[in-house]
Amino acid sequence: MSVLKELGEGLLVAGWRVFWVPAGAGPGGVRPTLVEGWEDLAEAEKQAGINPGDPILLAPDYRVDELLCLYLRTRRFRRYTAETKRNYAIDICLFLNFLWARGHVWTQAVAEDVDDYEDWRRFAPENANRVSGAKWDRELTALAGLYAWAEGRELISQNPVAMKEILGRDGTVIRVPAGKAKDAKRSDVRWLTPRAWRRWVDVGMRGHGAGGVPVPTWAGRLEDRNAAFADLLHSSGMRLSEGGSLLTFEVPSIRLRGGRYYVGRIAAAVTRSKKSRTFYVAVHVLGGVEAYQQGLRAEAVRKAQAAGRYDAVVDMRLVTQVTTGTKRQVHWCDRNGVVGKKALADLTVAERMTLYTEGPQGPEPLWLWLNEQGLPFRVSSWENVFRSANERCRAVLDPAPAPPGLDPYRSVAPQATPHSARHSFALYMLVVLHYLMDRKFGLTPEERRDFRLLYGDPWRMVQDLLGHADLETTRAIYLAPVADLQLRSLLETAPLLGGDGVESAGSLDDLFARVARETEGIQDIDARMEVTRKGHAG
């Protein structure tokens, strides 16, 4: 990946580039063809300590910096999520480009270089790609990690990134960059109300027109898969990597009393905090997942088996047993007859893609979400699915060009990302939990205050559901056991996000509409859509 253009046209004549070490097999586990003379490449990489997924930075003169390679292979860098590794590698690459234009290498950087770089990235009028304070903070954190490592190994005489000491959440003193932006907006949180979410799925993924019915010309071959996945994220609050890496036997099968929600478990290795947690999914959403499994997914598997695609999967691990109990173990045998096992909670996203099971017609993936070829659908590919759905919503619901400066979240066409599904889940749960607490218990304001002091309020329950790591120690130790019990009780009578339940989210639409009107960043279906689009198809 070249990052030359990000620094501004005319600034550089060449740029650093990022390459990624591929796995031994390509998408779906199929081994790529190697260039003649490089048949031993995998063994050479292994001897050098280079692993699949490691970034390699190539200088403009086509040299590889050995010290940078060492840093990118450190345990700390490798433990970052795939998204963080990608972002940090590009952030470092951008700074290397800036230094290269000055005739410097990264070990020669001084504090003035970092200051000038911030000025260029954030404030220079001639830079058409200026970044926000939050983006600068991320770039500075990436540089701080590199230079702290180099400083600790005495590879540099002075750290060009100014640092300061603060008290961490656990009471220990930690060092953080001192030059973080004062105007950084910590997050760009966007939500969709339940009815806006339903409209986005129907139009963007199910091919409905503006009138609310399917368009005859719609040719969405994967709509069952895409809609099931989107609704799963929205109903459970899972992150993209969490929902996108589910295995078939991790689809929830335990139904809560009352029958409206199922309960499942997210493996620690695929979470950001590296801690397992419970998730809940509405029964009608789970029905959509099961319909995808029995229909579109089963058909893709049959076609792949008939075409012999699974025979070409070289890194296949055929699962022979999945133990029960609190610490489930996955046992497998690979193509070479080598057996192995690992705790289910410790299986990474990449490892999960290699797991298969012996079906009636031969091996089939345990990875839940498959592409049309019947091979595992990569987590990162979901971004394109959501992007395409957004484009269709705009084309159908906002066919006229948007006026300059229009807030896209106030337009008629709803827009969503995998993470806004999670944000919308948090909004829904917060409102519904408040609603249920008032309705089910009939508490006075004073009683509600006492109840919150004892068990915690809906805000804290939502934090639990999202699996956020920034929780106070006392809360994590003392509140967690009762929070789950209270939540289970409330969910037994919770209204659903649509479906065939007795009570649906429609009963709360007026409440969500009021919240949307009074809160910035919440997308809802407004009167314009109901009036101007009535009876029209896209």
Image (cartoon, helix red, strand yellow):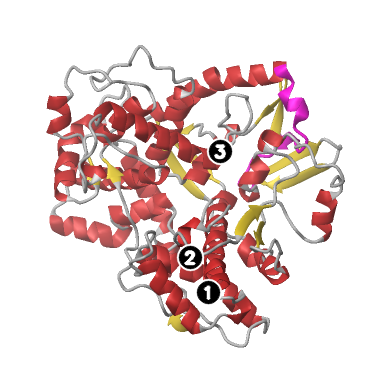
Vertical side of 448 occupied by 77: above or below = below
Q: Is residue 336 left or right of residue 293?
A: right
Q: Residue at x 26, y 43 (%)?
A: 408
Q: What's the CA distance linking mark 2 and mark 1?
A: 24 Å
Residue 9 image point, x, y percent: 45, 59
Q: Residue at x 61, y 57 (%)?
A: 17
Residue 496 appearing in the image: no
Vertical side of 264 occupied by 51: above or below = below
| In magenta segment, residue 428 | no
Vertical side of 503 occupied by 81: above or below = below
Q: Nearer the viewer, mark 3 or mark 1?
A: 1
Vertical side of 260 occupied by 457: above or below = below
Mark 3 in CB contact with mark 2 (< 8 angstroms): no
Looking at marks 2 and 1 on the same chain, the residue that comes earlier in the sequence is marked by 2
Q: Is residue 164 left or right of residue 412?
A: right
Q: Nearer the viewer, residue 299 or 169?
A: 299
Residue 95 image point, x, y percent: 53, 68
In the image, the segment drawn in magenta is 307-327
Looking at marks 3 and 2 on the same chain, the residue that comes earlier in the sequence is marked by 2
The residue pinned by badge 1 equals 144
The residue pinned by badge 3 equals 246
Residue 289 image point, x, y percent: 48, 27
Q: Quadrant of residue 132?
A: bottom left
Q: What's the CA distance linking mark 3 and mark 1?
A: 34 Å
Looking at marks 3 and 1 on the same chain, the residue that comes earlier in the sequence is marked by 1
Q: Is residue 277 left or right of residue 260?
A: right
| Crowd class of label 2 (few under 14; some 14 to 19; many from 20; radius 10 Å) | few
SS class of the residue under badge 1? helix
Q: Which residue is drawn at 36% across and 69% down?
A: 124
| Crowd class of label 1 (few under 14; some 14 to 19; many from 20; radius 10 Å) | many
Q: Is residue 239 left or right of residue 320?
A: left
Q: How many marks on residues? A: 3
